[in-house]
Amino acid sequence: MSKQDNKDKGLLTKLQKDWKQLDELGSPPIPTAHQMQEQLHMAKSAKRKAFQKELGMFVITALILLAAFTTVMFQAPIVFFVIQVSALVLAPIIFYFLQKSKAKQEGSILS
């Protein structure tokens, strides 16, 4: 019986050792305050760079569109007025169909 008890105790100690190793693997390291500040600074920096890039792209696109419309307006004013009138007429129609489509999608989700 003592041979069996020694075997059981050895197995029990081995299991406890394995459990401790699993506990150590399962708990993530807690970052220090300095590490948290550094991560926060890096995230803010990345966000600022992304914002500046997006803003730059927006400004460039806006300037290109403004230049194109100005050129069209001075070179062919009739074309400019046709574009403006068609936008004025077509915008509410497109808005109506988009709202109708959106309402239909929401209705199908609910049912």
Image (tube, grey):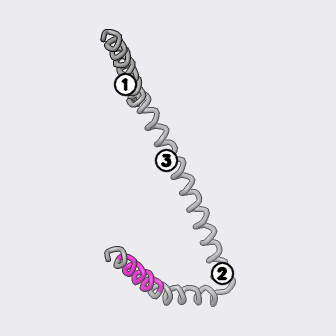
Question: Which residue was labeled with disc 3?
Answer: 47
Which of the two discs, 2 and 3, labels the residue nearer the N terminus? 3
Q: Position of residue 66 (x, y in %)?
A: 60, 72
Is 98 included in the stretch rendered in magenta? yes
Task: Please identify the quarter of the rendering in which residue 99 is found.
Answer: bottom left
Which tag is nearer the camera, tag 1 or tag 2?
1
Which amino acid does the dot numbered 3 rest on?
Lys
Question: Which residue was labeled with disc 1?
Answer: 19
What distance separates the C-alpha of mark 2 from that of mark 3?
Answer: 37 Å
Which of the two discs, 1 and 2, labels the residue nearer the N terminus? 1
Q: Position of residue 67 (x, y in %)?
A: 64, 72
Residue extending farthest to the right is 75
Task: Please identify the quarter of the rendering in which residue 60 is found.
Answer: bottom right
What distance separates the C-alpha of mark 1 from that of mark 2?
Answer: 75 Å
Question: Which residue was labeled with disc 2?
Answer: 72
Q: Position of residue 23 (x, y in %)?
A: 37, 27
Which amino acid does the dot numbered 1 rest on?
Trp
Q: Secondary structure at mark 1?
A: helix
**Total marks in image:** 3
- Where is the C terminus found, in terms of image quarters? bottom left
Q: Secondary structure at mark 3?
A: helix
